[in-house]
Every structure is written in structure tokens, then in C-alpha cells.
Amino acid sequence: MIEFIVIVESGADARTATKLAERVLVEKVDWLDEDNLQYFFQWSGLQNGTQHSCWRDIGKIIDEAKEQLRFKPPRFLGHDSKGEPLKADGAISVKVLNLVRFLQRTRQIKAVLFIRDLDNQPERRQGLEQARLEQVNRQPFLEIIIGTANPKREAWVLNGFVPLNQREKQILAEIKTRLTFDPCTESHRLRSTSLQEPDRMRNAKVIVEQLTDGDMRREQQCWEDTDLELLRERGIHTGLVDYIGEVEQRLPNLIQ
């Protein structure tokens, strides 16, 4: 079975990124639908039998691969092939890709998804792109998809929030008044990480919780049910459009 490796910060990130990718694939591949997706590929982590791997666990996973699979990573130089120092996340991404190359000997891994919150650190994406460039023209072929949420995954959730009833409309209206902007169309402006007043109102996590009343199923509807065109329209500044575009460009040919 073809595998697409998913590297994320959390299970919620994995659910968001993979479901969005599935929706894009169904849209772009005529004969594909939600019912037959499972027969053409699977989402996986670096370890067999897992559905994703987390950034925080990469060091441990590599150590286990050394011990259990006799993985011998190449000497790490700390810079790319042009001699440029690797930016944030570049180094760990290179290590992930070295392990994936090793795993390709026994597994049908065709793609890696790097999903990351920028958290006000644009250099994270730069590092991921550096790691991807190092793989150009290497064999066996490996597609690398980058998804960077600006500033975090909850900004993508807000891009997909559409009020379903009068209560939600009222809550959204009150939030708009306090913020003086629409958190669904301008969620990239919610850059706070604080849970304390007065900054908590500019924390995307706080806004998502208020709009969904902490209901994960309601949150999921924001990326599972909202029309992809609306997500594209709203997600220009949050990195969502870029991620959807990467999936459109890089994944369909792997299953056709």
C-alpha cells in the first residue's frame, strides 16, 4: 500500500491536514471519492502501524530506528548543499527525510507532509523549504508537501467557521465588535499566545473555543464541511491556500 508520511505537532493537526488533503484529492481526481480513498493510499507515521508522527518525538523515533532497524544516518553537517546554514526546522526535517529514505527500502512511501504552526516564526517555513530542495532529483522519488499555518492551526479552523444558528451568529458578532475585525476572514491577525486578559482575545485558540463552545465535532465541521472555495478565499494569509495548492500540485499524480 502506498504511504504518505505525516509529520505534525498534534493529533488535531494531523486530522485537519489529512482531511483537507483528502477533500482536495476527491475534487481533483475524477474517479476518486471518500469511499474508495482507503484503497489507494494510507496516512502513516514514521513508525509502522501509526497514522502520524509528532515533531517532538522525532529524536526518539530516530534513536529507535538506529537500534531496531539498524538505521545509520549520514553525517549531519548543519547546512544545505550550497553551504547555507539550515534555518529553524530545517535540520530536523533533513533528519526526517534521511530516515524516510531508509524506510523506502521496505515501505512504499511516496510522500511526506510537513505540517507546522509558524507561531510568528516565518523562518520555520524557510527551513522546511531548504530541506525539500535538498531532495530534488534524488531517487527513489519522494514528494514533499509543506503546510505552515499562520500563526497556528486554529487560524485554518476559523477560516472555515460559518455560523449555523442565531446563537453562533450573535457570538461571532460580539467577537467582531471586540476585535474590530472579522476573525474568520482575518484570522492571521490573531497572533497572541496568551490566555490572560487583555491579550487572550487575540489568541486564535481562545476564539475557536468561544465560537465552537469547545465542541471538537463542531470544530471539525470547519474543515470537513465548509466549501473549499470559501477556504481558498479566506485562507490567503493563513497559509491555508498555499497548503491546498501544494496538495493539488503534488499528490494527485501519486495515485493516478
Image: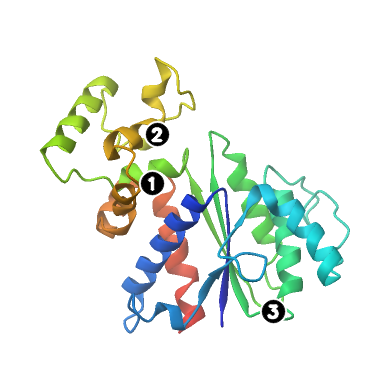
Would residue 246 be visible to someone looking at this image?
Answer: yes
Res 140 label: 3
Res 243 label: none
**Which quarter of the rendering shows the N terminus?**
bottom right
**Depth check: 67 or 97 in front?**
67
Residue lying furthest top in this view? 198
Taking the image as shown, residue 135 lies to the left or right of residue 243, namely right
Pointer 2 or 3: first along the chain: 3
Q: Residue 45: x percent and y percent?
A: 61, 64
Q: How busy is the neighbourhood of tag 2: few (under 14 within 10 Å), some, or many (20 plus)?
A: many
Label 1 secondary element: helix
Q: Residue 166: x percent and y percent?
A: 11, 38
Q: How busy is the neighbourhood of tag 1: few (under 14 within 10 Å), some, or many (20 plus)?
A: many
**Which quarter of the rendering shows the C terminus?**
bottom left
Residue drawn where x is 45% and y is 75% of the image? 252
Taking the image as shown, residue 177 lies to the left or right of residue 20, namely left
Residue drawn where x is 57% and y is 48% of the image? 9
Which quadrant of the structure image shows residue 182?
A: top left
**Dot 2 amino acid type:** Ala
Residue drawn where x is 34% and y is 35% of the image? 209
Q: Establish if 45 lies above or below 157.
A: below
**Dot 3 amino acid type:** Pro
Label 3 secondary element: loop
Q: Residue 74: x percent and y percent?
A: 86, 63
Res 204 label: 2
Label 2 secondary element: helix
